[in-house]
Amino acid sequence: MIKRYSFIALMASILLVLAFYWWFQGDLITTALYIALTIISFFTVPLLYRFAGYSEADDIEWLEEREANEHIEMRERLSVIKGELSELSLHEGVRQAKVLTDIIDDYHSVVETRFFGKANAPVTYLGAARTVQKHAVQNLADVVAVGHSLSTLTHNYRQAEEVENAEQQKRHDKQTVLYETQEQRLSSLLEENNQLFHSLTETAVEVANIRSFSDYERTDALARLVALAEIANKGGK
């Protein structure tokens, strides 16, 4: 919004300078002084916009729109992931997709009812919680990829059992190692998500119980959530 008002102010300033120059028949000194005054006036627009509180209102509106869009996008992605997990018969993954959907819905409700339109909202919590949620969604997407690789390895493993030559036996042994490695990765991803869910739920409960958002910024739960968010950011790079 401020960009729009600044653009309007800029266009108006240019027109006024041209009109001033024409009116005073090209008096360069007077025009230069007027231009200097115009520049000063132009830069007061964003300052007045901020001090009048309009900038904060724009920030809140932008946060609301971003939160609504992210909520829809994450739910849609989770729905697709849950369907793929179901097709792969990864029941723990399906359960986690349902749990994460509930966590995201609860978070969205809390954000709408407790944070928007309120002063001193815990921005650190909002950002950290969303980062951890996205990481958990990505973990489930990785579970789908691992599930497909396990399905392929299982198919190849059965084919290898039907032949007895030495070369095929080597491939069979290698695929056995790959299968075990992928199973370990699958278990690791699911276990990590369980830990993320615990942290998200714990911090959400604290948010519901605190009286002052400034008090929440000093809680241990927030520190743990921020640490998880930092790990998630590093893992996503």
Image (cartoon, rainbow, N blue to C red):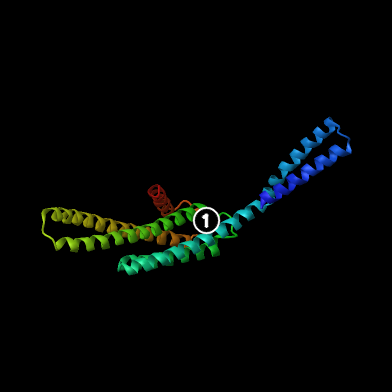
* Secondary element type, mark 1: helix
User: In this view of the protein, which residue sits in the foreground, 99 or 181?
Assistant: 181
x and y, in percent, of residue 206 in the image: 45, 60
x and y, in percent, of residue 225 in the image: 41, 53
Q: Amino acid at mark 1?
A: Phe
Q: Is residue 175 visible?
A: yes
Reading the image, the residue beneath label 1 is 213
User: In this view of the protein, which residue sits in the foreground, 105 or 23?
Assistant: 23
Q: Is residue 37 left or right of residue 165?
A: right
- The image quadrant of residue 78 is bottom left
- The image quadrant of residue 47 is top right
Rendered residue at 56%/54% (across/down): 120
x and y, in percent, of residue 13 in the image: 77, 43
Rendered residue at 13%/61% (across/down): 163
- 223 over 70 or under it: above or below: above
x and y, in percent, of residue 129 in the image: 45, 56
- The image quadrant of residue 41 is top right
User: In this view of the protein, which residue sits in the foreground, 223 or 13?
Assistant: 13
Q: Is residue 198 visible?
A: no
Rendered residue at 55%/60% (across/down): 115
Count residues near mark 1 (Cα–Cα under 10 Å), then give few for <14, some for 14-19, many for 20+. Answer: some
Q: Is residue 59 left or right of residue 52?
A: left
Q: Is residue 169 left or right of residue 67?
A: left
